Image (cartoon, rainbow, N blue to C red):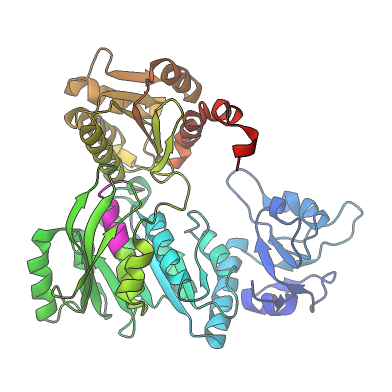
Amino acid sequence: MIALTASQIAAAVGGTLSESLDPETVLTAVTPDSREVAGQDGVLYVAKPGEHADGHDYIDAALSAGASAVLAERATTAPDGSAHPSILVEDAVMAMGALARDVVARVRAHSETTVIGITGSAGKTTTKDLLAAILAEQGPTVAPQGSFNGEVGVPLTVFRASLDTRYLVVEMGADHVGNIAYLCDIVKPDIGVVLMVGTAHAGSFGGVANIAKTKGELVEAIGPEGVVLLNRDDSQVAAMAERTTAPVVWFSTDEDTVPLIAEDVAGGRAAGVALARNLTTDVEGRPVFDLQLGADTEAPTVPVTSGLIGVHHAHNVVAAAGAAAAAGVRPADIAGVLDGLGPTSRFRMERTERPDGVTVINDAYNANPESMRAALKTLAQLGRATGRRTWAVLGEMLELGDEHIREHTLVGETVVRLNIAQLLVVGAGARPLYIGALNEGSWGEEAHFAADLDEAFDLLSKLLAPGDIVLVKSSNGSRLAQLGERLAAVGAEDSASSTPKEERP
């Protein structure tokens, strides 16, 4: 974080300094995790209440590890009775947002900084990673670590900015109406990207209509001087063009949509395009296409072969390309970075080739019905292209509300209809998926159910054979990413020990 004194931070967050905190104490880092304090200077530890723990209980640990001050909701004391050096606020999370807003303003005042916001029910992290890779070639770029995208994650991303940050990429997630508007008020995006509207968090939102309403808060936050990139292939996203005064750039991977996009450009309803033309996939399931960026559908194209697995990722690639173009990057430079670029965040179609010939694709960071189907289609395509046996190892999709049973059942039916050879459903919450597959016609030795991760691992250890392709996918809270890691690690130690010492890297 840019260097700020305790008094400056207190002013930004509307806080009160404890008598034990020197107002001139310089703070250069912020964390709500006491375990991250060690090894850093000038740390402000945020004692925020959490779902499972209260950060105030770890103030002594943070200060002992070297924290210089604490942002807290109540005054606390050390074991010896002395007051902790604190900035006291009513709400620590809201104070993080207020401080992030102040930091963005200071960075903008110092440098020509472009802020890009990305939202959508799926694909945010992948798109963010791609865009950050492009922009990093152009100047100092800050983007979220992993999937920091909420009221805590966005400020933590902002705190990593310096005064010379040229590009700030912000991933914006939400589970309630108003979440995106709040994040936009913090970072004031110049460019907004809306990827898709799906059923993720439908339960907490109260329905898909509210998801669309919330995702659209990003386009409403951007004025005529900015740019909004919208997915023309998603009707709910396309409708958001009516909610912004900013120029709209359509992105698409569907050739059938191109004539409509051309009409929009000609009629002044769109200011530009980001298109994947002639889209196919190679034998490894990677999208191959001609990238078209510019003012219209007649702009020159540049060939791209993505390093990502799954044709659905073409949307993420063109969205990132369009955002980079809106930020002023040349199409040739954009294509040069995207060509061959694979995933950089964990558990996003993360592919491991085991020594025994089994391929493990760990896509278990998150899941909703749309991303489940996209991943399953990729698995089915890989099976057809290679002739190898396919396994879908699936866990629960969380936060679907009243649609939980129906959506899991439909995904189970999809597995069968795609002719995926083997299905393993893990966890009681995902059992409707297993039942859906059985009712659709998958029975006997084709469909399996495991109560937990250990049972699933044991079953797969017995049944997997050389050449199998295994997709592991669930919502993050279902923890199948851990199962994916265990599966991917099988044989790795034996393989390493058999490597001659002089040949080890």
Judged left or right of residue 273, residue 348 is right
Q: Looking at this view, name the residue that lies furthest to the top.
A: 444
> Considering only vertical position in the picture, is 387 above or below 12?
above
Q: Is residue 218 visible?
A: no
Percent x, y for residue 434? 30, 24
Judged left or right of residue 154, residue 207 is left
At x 57%, y 80%, the residue is 164
Instruction: Assess whether residue 401 is covered by the magenta stretch.
Output: no
Percent x, y for residue 319? 30, 64
At x 33%, y 42%, the residue is 400
> Considering only vertical position in the picture, is 24 above or below 323?
below
Q: Looking at this view, name the residue that lies furthest to the right.
A: 80
Percent x, y for residue 200? 34, 48
> Considering only vertical position in the picture, is 38 above or below 405?
below
Quadrant of the image containing the C terminus? top right
At x 58%, y 62%, the residue is 93
Extent of the magenta region = 310-318
Judged left or right of residue 12, residue 239 is left
> Considering only vertical position in the picture, is 458 above or below 156?
above
Q: Quadrant of residue 496?
A: top right
At x 48%, y 25%, the residue is 453
Quadrant of the image containing the N terminus? bottom right
Magenta stretch: helix, strand or loop mostly: helix
Nearer-the-camera pick, 15 or 69:
69
Percent x, y for residue 174? 41, 57
